[in-house]
Image: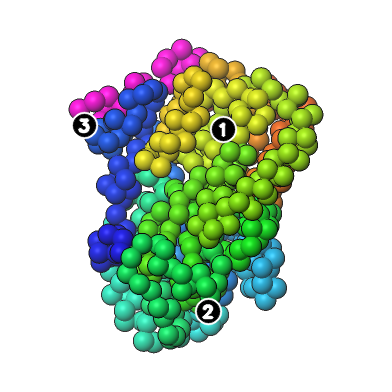
Amino acid sequence: MNELTYTYLKAREAPKREDRLGAANALGKCGGKRCALRESGCLKNAARSFQQTQGCQLYLASSIINTFINAVIVVHAPLGCASANTMAAGTTRVVQRQRDPRASGLIWVNSNLDNSDVVNGGEAKLAEAIRYADRTFRPQAILVASTCVPGIMGDDIENVIDDMQSKVSAAIVPLHCEGFRSKIMATAYDSVYHGILKTLLDKRRERKPLPLVPDEYADFREKLAVTHSVNVFNVSSMSRPDELELSRLLSACGLTVRLFPCYAHPDDFGYIEEAALNVSVCSTHDDYFGGHLEGITGTPYRNFDIPIGTKAIRHWVTGIADFFGFGEIARQICDNEETKLREALAPYRERLAGKRVYLAGGEIRALAMAEFLRDDLGMEIMTIQAYHYDQFADGLLERVEQGGERLFASGTGQPFEQTNILMKEKPDLYIGHVGINGWAGRAGFPVFPLWIVSVNYMGYSGAFEIARRLVRILKNSAFNRNLAAHIPLPYRAEWYEKDPYSYIKEGNAVGARG
């Protein structure tokens, strides 16, 4: 079994990614030294003497738990912490109902901590919020997200949950989302999966387990004889069109596709081990979940690059099909799809070739997008700024840097660094996540979102959709030019003359900047 089973799940909460993976989010250009620095631990303690923004773990955790159907989120926090849910509520309801017409949408309850609770503790309010959520909405699960304030106060949410579990009908899941615990936002994913693995898997229905022989993955013949099903871990930054496209490709190979964990019912986790294979779409999102599931259930876990662009799509589809012995038909499907895609992309490639791009966002998605833009569309990649950097980026980063090293950096947000580089490089296009995109738009650059909930990015149809939208955006950048002309950025002129990474402090013994 996977060693994760015997370590992290015994703890109250998931470890920081700085400790578990040596992840770093204070990295400037390091060239070939990057991997050596990470492996030596010299990036783990790198930091900034000044930083403009830092991601919130509650927000990233909410991107998963807000999708669950027939569940209520209890945000144990002051009232403002869950305010971002107001932006997600409408979208969540629509996308939930695309899967289940009975879905009620996003429901959350706030424990509403105040100044008095900071002194006296908020455990009583948490208990009341759990009781209210169960009595009012009768959900299958109540997901308790503990935030910075109760973390600082020392509220024992596990003790409250243990006491309340016998008093309510819903399964209660503890989630530690204290933002100060880690500088790596993606630790929030581990926090969510830690709670799910310890709670919802134990609620699975009673049934006779499938017979397994303790050996290599060939010993799954018994399970393969029953089903050719695969669990695809649908990351929170996937659209419904993405899911349909990936399901289409795997179904054409003869596989049955089930999507977890986003937009699942809490009870669905009790059936997760009935698939023969668990597959990642993004290692940043999934490795904690998939690795533990392999240890707990014995179901193999495969980690592939996000299927954006022909190279990554082929690797993802054929890698899954090979496991089931369907590799030949998968390659035929990919050959056919790529032939049609090249023909469809030809007029767009003519207009996009040579355009210079700045990319920012999650490390795996940003790097995969860079490979697609360069190899399939002929665009030039200037800079890639990942939210953090860890071992999962190594292979993809090496491929992206073939033929010439790109400027690769890591930092969550940090618009002052980003704007400095943009003004120096003057790219033709900026691609990044919503939020940080606004700074590039204010600087006058055309902006394309790295992900939005309604657009297809993955698979072959996603590749065409990206190209089509890029051409349309580059046709007219007047809006962004007008923003730059009328809304000045807050930085002094002398800042643009400095090294953009001059505020990065050194890690242990070696500088974090190359």
The amino acid beneath tag 1 is Glu
Q: Quadrant of the C terminus?
A: top left
Q: Residue at x 31, y 79 (%)?
A: 162
Image height of 383 relative to 78, above or below: above
Query: Residue 509, which numbered label?
Result: none
Give the residue number, with chain letter if any, for mark 1: 371
Residue 496 lies within the magenta run: yes
Toward the viewer: 148 or 404?
A: 404
Give left or right: position of 256 versus 295: right
Answer whether labels 1 and 2 touch (C-beta < 8 Å): no
* Cα–Cα span, label 1 and label 2: 43 Å
Give left or right: position of 144 versus 95: left
Nearer to us: label 1 or label 2: 1
Give the residue number, with chain letter if any, for mark 3: 508
Disc 2 is placed on an element classified as loop
Toward the viewer: 260 or 46?
A: 260
Query: Residue 139, which numbered label?
Result: 2
Between disc 2 and disc 3, whose residue precedes?
2
Between disc 1 and disc 3, whose residue precedes?
1
The scheme the figure's colours follow is rainbow
Residue range (magenta): 492-514
Main SS type for the magenta part?
loop
Answer whether labels 2 and 3 touch (C-beta < 8 Å): no
The amino acid beneath tag 3 is Asn
Nearer to us: label 1 or label 3: 1
Badge 2 local density, few (<14 within 10 Å), some, or many (20+)? some
Nearer to us: label 2 or label 3: 3
